[in-house]
Each structure stands twice: as structure tokens, then as C-alpha cells.
Amino acid sequence: MEYHAVLDIGSRMITMALRFFNAKEGSESTVYAAVESHGIANMTIENNPQVVTQIKQLCAILKTKTGIDVKEVYVSYIGGIVSVKEFSSNVPCTGIAANHTLAKQDDLQKLEASYLNFPADSDSVVVDHFVLEYKKDDQPYPRKDLVGSYAKTLSCRFLMFLAQRTQYERLQIALADANLKCMGMYVGLRACGTYLINSNERAQALVLLDDAHSEVGFYENGVLTRYEWFPGGWDVIRKNLLREDPYLRPTDLEVSYLKTMDLTAFKPEWFAQGNTEDDKLKKVGGHLNVGYLVNFRELFTKKWDVNQQLKHGGGVILTGSIAAVKGIEYFFNLCLARKLQPEQLYTIKVAKHEQPPHWEASQSQNANESFNLFSVPFGLLNLLKKDEIPMSVSGETVTQEKAQAETPSTESESEREATKEKERWILGGVLNRVGEFFGNMFAEDLSSYDADKEDAKKEK
């Protein structure tokens, strides 16, 4: 039985989804499961045995449900701050027809493998990448039409996602200890975007909210063009809520209560229609500005300058485990309304997930869970299908040698070696590196942080 298995390790939950295809029956099904996460701190693996135990538990749950012994898995990267860089590359066209050069399939393959030439240092690794734009002779051109077209050169721009090598290696160790072969690694937000972003919108942003971090992406016509990773999540909101209201109990705001929490009922005066009085909004604006909105506002209004595009486009979509909190979108809108002028405001809404047919929760307690909790593994499955990546075979590992033996090849020896090199990197065999990381944006003591004063300083 063929399958795709995908894994997402979060600070609150570890989730896995398994899509399998029965060739005899011609049917396709997907099951998913989740367990509580332990051994993760600040979005990095701090206790490997705990993480390994939970991954094995998920594999056992899915095996009981499907009979498939998962050996190969695609993974959403976890390991702290992820940064992004652009990288451009080009190759000469080698086809010749009547004294004219044209692009061959081999040229396109060589171009798409050229991301391996990204300059590296010893401290970082490329954990994900994709092509932003293809060109022939410096003119944008659709990928599907490149092969066979008259051209002297092919070129493209890559978006490269970079992480700290030490954290990447911890994830690889955990997968190996769980007896899983890593077939590919992806950034969670890029995976979510494959089915949450509307490709017909000229501009849209996606925010993935986790307990300890946020990922933000800006999409143009459905293509991710900008990306940012922020430390801080529900832990920041919770700390500031507790500081603000002395009558709150810490247990009232534990992450385990997310499914039943309703922020609009928790503080109804914040969400009263027409409530724009500064004294009523001061507290909520202040504590959220510490954790999220200073960064989001600066990102959208200044660094990326996309407020107007978002206002007239699809706005901002929230997903991830924290997006399951009822009223979280009103929470965000309220804080932005206090700090942005009406002409700058854009829509913020929670992603709507509709369960596709033939999808089933492996555990009864997950059957009614918000799909925001599973947005990354569902997005990964979508990404794999979109990229037409072959499924693994249950009970058998299809090796490169076996695939070559079964499929005649017309590649030269050097071309085969380039293909092997690309596949070795995808399987985790190559650690590309690059410097320049974001510093810890929340290294200061937030207990003394005054959002209004900080904003006043910036305005001066």
C-alpha cells in the first residue's frame, strides 16, 4: 500500500497525518492523530527521549488504524528562528536546432538543482526552498513552457529558508531515534499556504500562531514572496493577561483550555460594538503590542509596506493552534484599530478548514478538534500532492538503485550524479549554511515594557 506520512512537532501538540492509496480498490484515505508535546522549549528540541517517545506513539496509533508501519516521513521543521534569503541562478541552454539554441529537460533539471550552490557557512542550513520565478533570457516565462523554447539561458529566483545547524541536527537525531527516514523538510507556513491562500487574491497574508512562535508570510497571486519568523506566542499573551488582571487564575489561561476559551466572553467590554474609547482599549492594546502587534504592524506597514495591498486584497488569515481560540481575530482587530488609521486597516480572520471526504481522526477526542490544530500536516499533504512527489510503499523502501533499474535512463553519468546529489540533500545528507540570523526580539524583560511609550518613541 502506498502512502505519504507527514509530521509536525509543536510546543503544545505533535501531530501526524497519513494518506494512503489502495491500488486494488482505487481508493484514497487520510487519517490523522495528535499527542501532547513534551521535550520542546522555545520551539527547539530540549529532551530528545521525550520527543522520540511521542513520535513512536503517533506511529503506533496510525498503524493500529491503518495497518501501515510508517518508516518514511515528511517533516515540518522545528528548531527555533528561521530566516529567509533570495538566491538567483542561471544555466546555459544546450539544445541546438537549425543553429538556434533551445532549452532541454536536462537544462531545467540542472537549473532546479542549482540551489545547492547557495553560499554556506558552518552555522546554518537550508531547511526548505522553492522557486519564485522562472525566466528565459531574462524574461519571465512559465515553467511548463520552458522545455523546447528558443533561449540562450534559463534562470530563476529561489526563496531559501535558513535555520541554525545545531537545531536542525537535533531534529534529524530525533527522527533517526524514532526509526524514521526523513524524506523531505518544509517550513510549516509554506505548507499551510498551499490550501489556505486564495491564489485569485492579488495580495494576502498568512499568520501561523503557535504557543511559542509566529510565522508570517505575504502572498502575491498565491505565491509566497516574503516571510518572517517571530519568537513569542500564546505564552506572551498569557503572561500579560495575568499581569493585567490580578483576579485571574493561571489555570484559567492554560493552553489546554484553548478549545473552550472565548475571548469575547472573557472580556466582553473589549469587544462592544463601537467601542473606541482609548481608556477601554488601553490594556488590551498594551499587552498584545508586547507580544505580537508591534512586530506585525511594523512588518506590514514599514518593512514590507503592504498595508494597502492587504486592505484591497484578501487581508490576513490566522491559523495554527492559537487560532483555535474563539475571538482571537477580534482580539487582533481591536489592537490594530487602536494603532492604525482607518485607511490602513485590513481584515483579520481565522482560517476556515473544511474536512475533505475520506479524512478520519484516528482518535475520538480529535474528531471535533479545530482543524487549525492540524493545519500544518494537512498543508504538507497538499504540498506533496501539488508537487507530485511519489508515495512511499508500505513494507518496502523504494531505493534510488531500484528505481533506476526499473526505469530506463537517458541521463549522462554527470547528470545522474547531479540528480543523486539533489536527492541526497532532500534526504538530509547535505547541510547548506548561511549566516545572518535575527536576534532574540524578546530578550529584554517584558514585565517593564510599556507599549504606548515604545510606540511614542518610534513616532518621534
Image (cartoon, grey):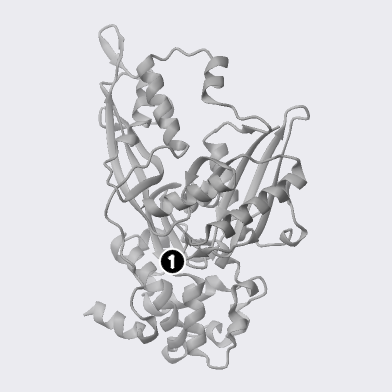
Q: How many marks?
A: 1
Closest to the observer: 46 or 99? Answer: 46
Which quadrant of the structure image shows residue 283? Answer: bottom left
Residue 147, can we see it?
Answer: no
Q: Residue furthest left?
A: 460
Which quadrant of the structure image shows residue 457? Answer: bottom left
Residue at the disc numbered 1? 346
Quarter of the rendering occupied by the C terminus? bottom left
Query: Is residue 222 left or right of 124 when viewed as pictured?
Result: right
Q: Residue furthest top?
A: 98
Residue at the location (44% across, 27% down)?
144
Quarter of the rendering occupied by the N terminus? top right
Closest to the observer: 389 or 50? Answer: 50
Q: Residue 262: give x, y in percent of width and height.
A: 63, 77
Q: How many residues crowd around disc 1 within 10 Å: few (fewer than 14), some, or many (20 or more)?
A: many
Which quadrant of the structure image shows residue 391? Answer: top right
Residue 88, can we see it?
Answer: yes
Residue at the location (25% across, 78% down)?
459
Indicate whether 310 appears above or below 90: below
Closest to the observer: 107 or 346? Answer: 107
Indicate whether 293 appears above or below 434: below
Q: Residue 337: give x, y in percent of width and height.
A: 43, 76
Indicate whether 400 appears above or below 310: above
Q: What residue type is disc 1 on? A: Tyr
Q: Residue 253: give x, y in percent of width and height.
A: 59, 80
Query: Is residue 29 left or right of 346 when viewed as pictured?
Result: right
Query: Is residue 146 left or right of 189 when viewed as pictured?
Result: left
Dot 1: what SS? loop
Q: Residue 197: give x, y in percent of width and height.
A: 51, 51
Indicate whether 450 appears above or below 48: below
